Amino acid sequence: MVAADKMYELLITILAGLAGLCMWIVRRLWGRIDTIESRVDNLYQDRLKKSDLDKIIDIQHLILQNLLTKRKNKNGEN
């Protein structure tokens, strides 16, 4: 009976240790996932969006249109 109690205590100690180890591993993994998510969020914020590119394209069209009309006026054409 005494040997069985010692075996149960040993088994409970081993299981508690494994559970603690598993919890530590899970905590570390979640911490790394949080770090990766924050890095991805920072990269996403630095990325240009389509609306930003549309504004740049509109400005380019205005500049080109202005340059073309000035060139026509220098040549005497209307």
Image (cartoon, rainbow, N blue to C red):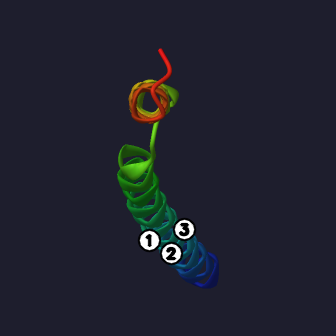
Dot 3 surroundings within 10 Å: few (below 14), some, or many (20 or more)?
Answer: few
Q: How many marks?
A: 3
Instruction: Determine whether label 3 and label 2 are within 8 Å by CB.
Output: yes
Dot 2 surroundings within 10 Å: few (below 14), some, or many (20 or more)?
Answer: few
Instruction: From the viewer's side, name the closer residue of 20 and 44.
Output: 44
State which quarter of the image contains the N terminus. bottom right
Q: Secondary structure at mark 2?
A: helix
Q: What's the CA distance linking mark 3 and mark 2?
A: 4 Å
Q: Which residue is mark 2?
A: 21
Q: Is residue 70 above or below residue 30?
A: above
Residue 50 at x, y percent in the picture: 52, 29
Q: Which residue is mark 1?
A: 24
Q: Secondary structure at mark 1?
A: helix
Instruction: From the viewer's side, name the closer residue of 16 and 42.
Output: 42
Q: Is residue 21 above or below residue 29?
A: below
Q: Which residue is mark 3?
A: 22
Instruction: Determine whether label 2 and label 1 are within 8 Å by CB.
Output: yes
User: Residue at coordinates 60% horizontally, 75% vertically from top-left?
Assistant: 11
What is the residue that sits farthest to the top in this orientation?
A: 78
Instruction: From the viewer's side, name the closer residue of 21 and 3.
Output: 21
Instruction: Determine whether label 3 and label 1 are within 8 Å by CB.
Output: yes
User: Residue at coordinates 43% horizontally, 55% vertically from top-left?
Assistant: 43
Q: Amino acid at mark 2?
A: Leu
Instruction: From the viewer's side, name the closer residue of 65 and 13.
Output: 65
Q: Is residue 40 above or below residue 26?
A: above
User: Residue at coordinates 62% horizontally, 80% vertically from top-left?
Assistant: 7
